[in-house]
Image (cartoon, helix red, strand yellow):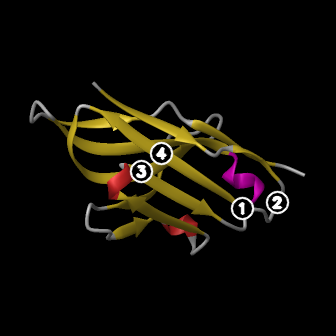
């Protein structure tokens, strides 16, 4: 069984920063791409950023250089550094990973999410 657990969310003032973490654990053979998504109240889940096993990153246009995705393969962990946060960034942030389990099956896994609230 594979699990993704996010952490690092919370309440931050406009203009502030947060660093989210997502750790994968369980019966893992290989982790391919990892990424972050978010879902604001009343809106669909949207893509934020992804990073390959080799470190190549892709970002949604709205990130505009404010967010940086990174990963530590030794720790099976992906990070999202978020700067210059504003109220529109308020959402539940979800981690996603494409994981090959020890059974050699490839599946997409999701974490349960971590709440980020930007408010003064």
The mark that comes first in sequence, 2 or 3, is: 2
Q: Which residue is mark 2?
A: 14
Q: Quadrant of the N terminus?
A: top left
Number of on-image labels: 4
Q: Which residue is mark 4?
A: 22
Q: Residue furthest bottom?
A: 65
Mark 1 falls on what kind of element?
loop
Q: Position of residue 56 (x, y in %)?
A: 32, 70
Q: Which residue is mark 1?
A: 17
CA separation in Å, label 2 and label 3: 27 Å
The mark that comes first in sequence, 3 or 4, is: 4
Mark 2 falls on what kind of element?
loop
Magenta segment range? 86-90
CA separation in Å, label 3 and label 4: 5 Å
Side of 59 relative to 55 (left or right):
right
Q: Position of residue 72 (x, y in %)?
A: 39, 59
In the image, what residue occupies the spot 50% across and 56% down? 79
Q: Is residue 109 magenta?
A: no
Marks 2 & 4, CB-CB < 8 Å contact:
no
Residue 77 marker: 3
Above or below, 95 against 18 in this view is above
CA separation in Å, label 2 and label 4: 23 Å
Side of 82 relative to 68 (left or right):
right
Q: Position of residue 101 (x, y in %)?
A: 18, 35
Residue 39 marker: none
Quadrant position of residue 3: top left
Marks 3 & 1, CB-CB < 8 Å contact:
no
Marks 3 & 4, CB-CB < 8 Å contact:
yes
The mark that comes first in sequence, 4 or 1, is: 1
CA separation in Å, label 4 and label 1: 17 Å
Quadrant position of residue 62: bottom right
The mark that comes first in sequence, 3 or 1, is: 1
């Amino acid at each position: 069984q594979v699990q993704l657990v996010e952490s690092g969310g919370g309440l931050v003032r406009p203009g502030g920063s947060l660093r989210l973490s997502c750790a994968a654990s369980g019966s893992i053979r290989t982790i391919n791409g990892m990424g972050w998504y978010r879902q604001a109240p009343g809106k669909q889940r949207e893509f934020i950023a992804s990073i390959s096993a080799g470190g190549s990153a892709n970002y949604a246009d709205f990130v505009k250089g404010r967010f940086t995705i990174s990963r530590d393969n030794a720790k099976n962990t992906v990070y999202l550094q978020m700067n210059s946060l504003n109220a529109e960034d308020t959402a539940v942030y979800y981690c996603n990973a494409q994981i090959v389990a020890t059974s050699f099956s490839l599946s997409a896994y999701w974490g349960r999410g971590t709440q980020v609230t930007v408010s003064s």
